[in-house]
Image (cartoon, grey):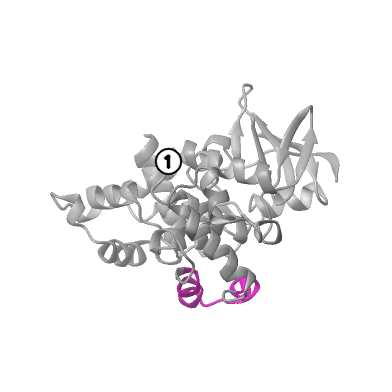
Amino acid sequence: MKEQEYKIENIQSFELADIFDCGQCFRWNKQQDGSYTGVFKGNVMNVQKEGNTVMFKGMCNGNIQEIVEEYFDLRRNYEEIKEQLSKIDKNVKESIEYGSGIRILNQDLWEMIISYIISANNNIPRIKGIIERLSKSYGKEIEWNGDKYYTFPTIEELKDVEVEDYRKLGAGFRDVRLYETVHMIIDNKVNLEDMQNNSNTIEVREQLLTLAGVGPKVADCILLFSTLKRFEAFPIDVWVRRVMNELYIKNEDETKVNKKQIEELAQQKFGNLAGIAQQYLFYWRKEA
């Protein structure tokens, strides 16, 4: 592991706040200079943007260019995706203009499973705090620029962690669910490699739903934001239900709008890009 730098000029569809604050990740933090520093897949990295130039710098496990291209999904043409989605209607077009710099990160599947179990009925600061304490307690330490960072713990590093240990980290009612999910994966009741290699999204979703603490919304977040990369997944939370109801369903009582109705509408309108459309709409409705 060594310190490396990588610079990209004239980058499109890449805005730091859009990527790191759109709700898809929990281990990136904004710095005083406007850059963001994060820990992912055993790397610590700072990302800074000036004009159309992005500078990546950090302690990396491997070649920084390859790591950046894979993690930030740089081999995908988001300009084409935005053009395609913008044709749907003026609302989608406006949401894309607002969050035009969003990219869906390729995050580690194991980390996303545990992180999104922690996210259930939780707020962003608390989620980030629990994940940070979990990493500090059981992950590996990386020192960089005089600061200490901690990698997300592996399955092996969590195998001896007990329910009360999760409770001490502030996991609340999720403590039992975290313990049970870790052991389901250790006991190979759910095989992450098989899941990664299975192209049938419905089957993968059903497997995810067998894990403790994984309901439909959490499963869809894992499908969309991890290396599973299923863009047809459409996570529905209170914001997504609100925006879909306000724009399309128009029920006077949004609490009466059921998820099935929203899912069907999303597939009909957005097809296999539903997940990306969801991110633009979610971010736009929540932030704007």
Membership of 229 in magenta stretch:
no
Q: Measured from the top left, where is residue 14 in percent x and y?
A: 59, 41
The answer to whether residue 101 is visible is no
In the picture provided, is 232 more to the left or to the right than 27?
Answer: left
Q: Residue flagged by tag 1: what amino acid is it?
A: Asn
Q: Residues within 10 Å of mark 1 (few under 14, many from 20)?
A: few
Q: Main secondary structure of the magenta part?
A: helix
Residue at figure coordinates x 70%, y 46% from the top left:
151
Q: Secondary structure at mark 1?
A: loop
Q: Measured from the top left, where is residue 21 in percent x and y?
A: 50, 38
Residue extending furthest toward the left: 252
Give the quadrant of the C terminus: top left
Q: Measured from the top left, where is residue 133 in percent x and y?
A: 60, 41
Span shown in magenta: 191-208
Residue at figure coordinates x 54%, y 51% from the top left:
164
The answer to whether residue 198 is visible is yes
In the picture provided, is 277 more to the left or to the right than 25?
Answer: left
